[in-house]
Amino acid sequence: MSIAQGKFQVYAPPLAWADMGWLILDVMKDKASGAWFFGAFPGESDQEAGDRCSWNWAPNASNTAEDRNWINGVPTFFPNYVLAQNGKPLVTRLPPWGASGGALFSLACTTDSTIGLTSNDRALIAGDYNNSNGGGFGMEFSDWANGRARVIDFAVGAPNTPVTATIGTNPNDLSKWRLWYGATSTELVGKNLSGDGSTPNPGPMALSGGRREGQQAFALFGRITTGANYTPTVTKKVSFVIRVDEVPSVNDLATLKAECEVLAGEQGVTLLSVTP
């Protein structure tokens, strides 16, 4: 805590490790490895908000400076979300998932109409997706005009060929706040947990021989790769990202969906609205 310019500010807890219970889940507590919540407090600069929001609130997560590194500076923060750019990722030291995979939840939307204009105009939300040689999992907005998001991963049986599960909403409709879900193990699954849209959830996509393990540490908002990368200026609005290191069962997924809906309310975001 500090007092500056007449403001009382809370940047983060005074410990280098988040205590058990900062992120409270009714199921899969021991599998939660990442939880990030975004938004600026009144009077905070982007730099101050970026430092506070880089903290991982999963139980027992490490939060040293090396664990929460903004590459190329911090993006722009608003009270309920961050306007994240591909070129300004938040890089963690969380390892990529192994062969057994895991799952991501995110409250996000985008108003960037450039998404999908070229193969590089994607808007990565989070993952350890590197490139076709490096492999890895990613969740991203892929096509503004057709209202599409997707998850991507790679299979042992075809290690350099991306497997995608594309989630369809209505055309020009990605500006609505939705709960997005992506999971990978022996198959790849993507879901719009808000349940709206013309074709909200594709069928599972098989990963031949199981999933190929990625090589990059987990990152938010941008790919960490030495090859051709996504357009740096493409943006998305993200309110939170939660990572679990196991694919939820049907019952656990229903519980986690309900808890994410509660978290959305605590973030001040109304699901399926176009403004927080």
Image: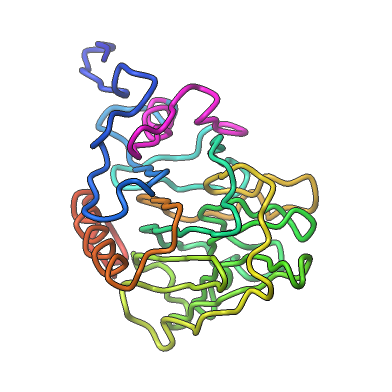
User: x, y (%) of residue 211?
Assistant: 64, 65
Quarter of the image with the C terminus in it: bottom left
- In the image, residue 35 lies in the stretch drawn in magenta: no
Above or below for 192 versus 111: below
Residue lying at 30% horizontally and 16% vertically, measured from the top left = 14
Number of numbered markers: 0
Above or below for 42 versus 124: above
User: x, y (%) of residue 267?
Assistant: 24, 49
Residue lying at 41% horizontally and 82% vertically, measured from the top left = 200
Residues 159 and 263: in front is 159
Query: Which residues make up the magenta segment?
Result: 48-73
Coloring basis for residues: rainbow
Above or below for 48 versus 140: above
User: x, y (%) of residue 273?
Assistant: 27, 67
Quarter of the image with the N terminus in it: top left
Residue lying at 50% horizontally and 31% vertically, measured from the top left = 68
Left or right, 221 with reference to 178: right
User: x, y (%) of residue 133?
Assistant: 80, 57
Above or below for 116 versus 90: below
Residues 131 and 222: in front is 131
State which quadrant residue 33 falls in: top left
Residue lying at 39% horizontally and 25% vertically, measured from the top left = 48
Residues 215 and 132: in front is 215
